[in-house]
Image (tube, coloured by chain):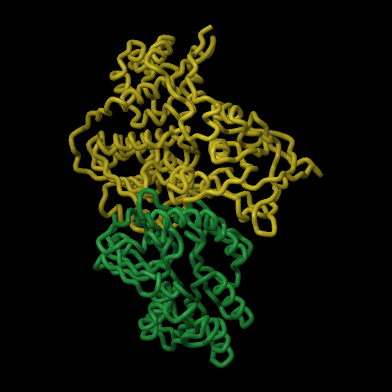
Amino acid sequence: MHKIITKKEIAPAVKLFEIKAPLVAKKARAGQFVILRIDENGERIPLTIANFDAQRGSITIIFHEVGKTTKQLGGLNEGDNIADIVGPLGNAMVSKKYGTVVCIGGGVGIAPIYLKIKAFKRAGNEVISIIGARTKELLILEEGIRKTSDELYIATDDGSKGHHGFVTDVLQELIDTKKNIDLVLAVGPVVMMRAVGNVTKRHGIKTVVSLNPIMIDGTGMCGACRVTIDGKSRFACVDGPEFDAHLVDFEELMNRQRIYLDEEDVALQKFEDHKCH
Amino acid sequence: MSLRLSMPELGLKKRRHSFDEVALGYSAEQAIAEAKRCLQCASIKSRNIKAECVRGCPTETDIPRFVKYVSEGDFDSAIEVIKERNALPAICGRVCPYENQCEKLCILSKKGEALAIGGLERFVADHERKKNIKVSKKAETSGKIVAVIGSGPAGLTTAADLAKLGHDVTIYEALHEVGGVLMYGIPEFRLPKEIVQAEVEYVKRLGVSIQTNVVIGRSIGVEGLLEKFDAVFIGTGAGLPRFLNIPGENLNGVYSSNEFLIRTNLMKAYKFPEYDTPIKIGKKVAVIGAGNVAIDSARVALRLGGEDVCIIYRRSEKEMPARAEEIKRAKEEGIQFKLLTNPVRIIGDEGGWVKQIECVRMKLGDSDKSGRRMPIPIEDSEFTLDVDTVIIAIGQSPNPLISKVTNGLKTTRGGAIKIDENGRTSLEGVFAGGDITPGTATVIEAMSAGKRAARAIHEYISR
């Protein structure tokens, strides 16, 4: 059992939990994730470790309430317990000195880049961050990222803050006007990561994305998270989650993320009906 | 002619949509009657002569002795005899391939039918569980501590044997449930999970402590364990699913058997939406492979609503590795067998879902290294089958996680951890057994490896 120590709503329907998980906190590194299961009947879902504190024996997760499991999770309160948390899983990011690194986070994908920005800074890189969301309320962790990054650009789909448009517009402009960019890192919706990859490929800029396919065990056993990288099948849980954006088959990934859409609706409907009664 | 008493089974109609156990087990009267058929072949310890059946048992259970007690109606003594050698009798009594082991060597089989040793083992184990499981005698506490990685049949057996010898054992399990393949792999209708948990409970009552949700190699390393423990046993199993490496394997609707069974057995997707984990099953299901896992997957698919479920296998019926009993049941339930057939590619529709599978017909050539005749494609014999779910069940490779992150742990080219005949690895104080090592394939072989390793660990830490 893992106790929820802190709960915050950091944007509409976006929750931050600090959870007791000493074993995970002790070994966690930027880029890794946990798998959690809320209770006996729950499914196992992967969530990026947004922060960790070995001394407090805690990890932080940030999630958007979109489906049954994330809504149920968001309904838990400080002091409540989560049945199972396992991790840290996946490979830690490689944080060496590249030179100038552009970190792009989209939506709830902003959460995982925060630790990465810090790691890139520690390794002596110049870090330019771009965060984007549908609307300004959904721009999470803005202050922290502003303080850590050398420069911060913002893009919103509705133009409520920063550039009116996509993070890729900002990236394109940076490439056009800026000196050399040595590495781009992008985490967010698959369409965004694909778009970033398309932009940087044209300019030959090395780009890393963190993939989020469906997973069950997270230890390489089930193969649900297989993704095609450079024509070969890889398991995101043990071979990733970070891959070279220019080698990822994004169409296939998007397709595989849609496998259970019908069932997700059924589960959500049942959960909401149950809540109303 | 001496014919064995057949075991009652769940009716065919009920089986179609139910995950209830198929084999129902003997009643006390039936068990006594069956046990009386035993010829009580003698084992002579002083001359190291063992009854044939005992020679066939990987855990060397004293079969004639426990069967004698059954024939006398003394079931409590019978289970005590079994538990001298085997901590998981209700599991073995269900999933052991006894027809290739103890029963194969039974003298009765020469003139009629072998004694139903597996059925009798199952009966006494179930009899004890219904009453109350007694904890075997334990040696005095040794003060030595041992870490066991993985709570499948190998790990549970090693832990139980070491605990009985007085050692303090901690099992680390990566998943949220204890039992490994017994929980995630073998379906409910062949091995009810309640029975696995009862036997796990027995291992706990021997004093073994179990920590779930700990991935050794991620949360803690083997080196870290060695700093704290006197010895480490690795029993992490064959976790890595194999794929065919043909086009279309990542289409929606294609599962590895591991994923398909984990969803169903471990996550209880057959009870969706009461349980949150979903599973998608079409009407036309093709399962590739013919081992026990393939047969299990096909029978699960049928129970989940598959109407047309077939096994596609590149060799002939004779070479199918699954247990004969389970193949028979699968056929009864309506599973089709497309033999001498090999998939070449999986074809998808515009939405990225499986639509068809293209196969080629095969013929058998000369024998290969395994002694089985090699399947050879017949030229221009390609044909397609309409399918909407494909399950790939062509085997698993050893879980690579620990060997990848542990310096000095030697593995074979296939990724299995190398061990000597006592389960010792290339690292001092580290032992291994079960599917993570070469050549193991069944629950009972994993248990037997666990027993060997437990003996070696005991010697090592008592030196």
Examine the rendering and report whether any part of residue B456 can be seen.
no
* Front residue of this view, candidates A260 and A85: A260
Quarter of the image that includes the N terminus of chain A: bottom left
Residue B429 in the image: above or below residue A238: above
Residue A88 in the image: above or below residue B29: below
Residue A169 location (% of width, % of height): 57, 85
Residue A33 in the image: above or below residue B317: below
Q: Residue furthest right?
A: B380
Q: Residue furthest top?
A: B1
* Front residue of this view, candidates A154 and B397: A154
Residue A247 relative to residue A155: left or right: right
Q: Residue furthest bottom?
A: A177
* Front residue of this view, candidates A162 and B71: A162
The residue under the point 70% across, 48% down is: B356
Q: Which chain is green?
A: A
Residue B152 location (% of width, % of height): 40, 41
Residue B284 relative to residue A116: left or right: right
The residue under the point 51% across, 66% down is: A211
Residue B291 location (% of width, % of height): 57, 36
Residue B77 location (% of width, % of height): 29, 18
Q: Residue furthest front?
A: A277
Residue B357 relative to residue A94: left or right: right
Q: Which chain is yellow?
A: B
How many numbered circles are shown? 0
Examine the rendering and report whether any part of residue A262 can be seen.
yes
* Front residue of this view, candidates B338 and A205: B338
Quarter of the image that includes the C terminus of chain A: bottom left
The residue under the point 40% across, 24% down is: B122
The residue under the point 47% across, 19% down is: B7
Residue B373 in the image: above or below residue B359: above
